[in-house]
């Protein structure tokens, strides 16, 4: 599968570059193809896998009673990733069946690199992508 990265905001698209970035609204020309982005990050920082790979827990959600809902809980790193001024998680993106659905953005310090997504699906594939300002992009795929 082809991977395209928005050079403006860092958003990733799987398959084809969109006409407009769903995060920053940059034009299609802002996207650059890089099919090895995840492998490059792991290769450049093999000892950091435990601090960068998203840990994902899914469960039936009780907060949203109005319809079907799954709570997707995300924490960055089996060993919690640091959130320092010079080394931090910039964002965590959520994709459902390959389609971008949400982003949680972070500032360094005063917050842990973790978030919840409440999704309307109870089956399918969830992909979580995170970007470390120093060590690049990391991902985890889970089936609901």
Image (spheres, rainbow, N blue to C red):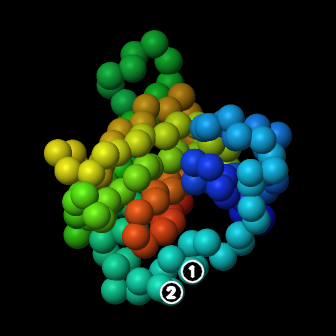
Visible residue check, residue 29: yes
Residue at image coords 41%, 63%: 133
What residue is drawn where x is 51% and y is 77%?
41
Residue 142 in the figure: left or right of residue 32: left
Element assignment for label 1? helix
Relative horizontal placement of residue 144, taking residue 89 as reference (left or right): right
Query: Which quadrant would the N terminus be assigned to in this image?
Result: bottom right
Disc 1: which residue: 40
User: Is 51 rendered above or below residue 142?
Assistant: below
Residue 112's x, y, as percent?
Answer: 22, 50
Q: Position of residue 135 (x, y in %)?
A: 43, 72
Query: Badge 1: few (under 14), some or many (20 or more) residues near its Cα, within 10 Å?
Result: some
Q: Is residue 117 above or below residue 37?
A: above
Residue 126 visible to the viewer: no
Along the line of sight, which residue is nearer the eye, 98 or 39? 39
Q: Position of residue 11 (x, y in %)?
A: 60, 50
Q: CA distance from mark 1 to mark 2?
A: 5 Å
Q: Is residue 131 above or below residue 114?
A: below
Observer-nearest of 91 and 56: 91
Q: Nearer the viewer, residue 77 or 135?
A: 135
Count of marks overlaid on the render: 2
Q: Residue at x 71, y 70 (%)?
A: 34
Sort mark 2 into few (<14), some (14-19) or many (20+) by Cα contacts within 10 Å.
few
- Labels 1 and 2 touching (C-beta < 8 A): yes
Give the secondary structure at mark 2. helix
Q: Residue at x 43, y 49 (%)?
A: 91
Q: Determine whether, in the image, residue 136 is placed left or right of residue 108.
A: right
Q: Position of residue 119 (x, y in %)?
A: 50, 32
What residue is pinned by disc 2?
Answer: 43
């Amino acid at each position: 599968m082809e991977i395209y990265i928005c050079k403006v905001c860092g958003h990733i698209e799987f398959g084809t570059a969109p006409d407009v970035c769903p995060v920053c609204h940059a034009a299609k020309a802002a996207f650059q193809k890089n099919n090895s982005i995840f492998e490059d990050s792991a290769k450049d920082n093999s000892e950091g896998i435990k601090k960068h790979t998203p840990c994902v827990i899914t469960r039936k959600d009780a907060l949203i009673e109005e319809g079907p809902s799954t709570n997707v809980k995300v924490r960055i790193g089996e060993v919690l990733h640091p959130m320092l001024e010079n080394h931090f998680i910039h964002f965590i993106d959520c994709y459902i069946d390959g389609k971008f659905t949400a982003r949680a953005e972070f500032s360094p310090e005063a917050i842990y690199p973790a978030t919840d997504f409440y999704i309307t699906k109870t089956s399918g594939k969830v992909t979580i992508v995170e970007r470390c300002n120093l060590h690049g992009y990391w991902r985890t795929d889970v089936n609901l």
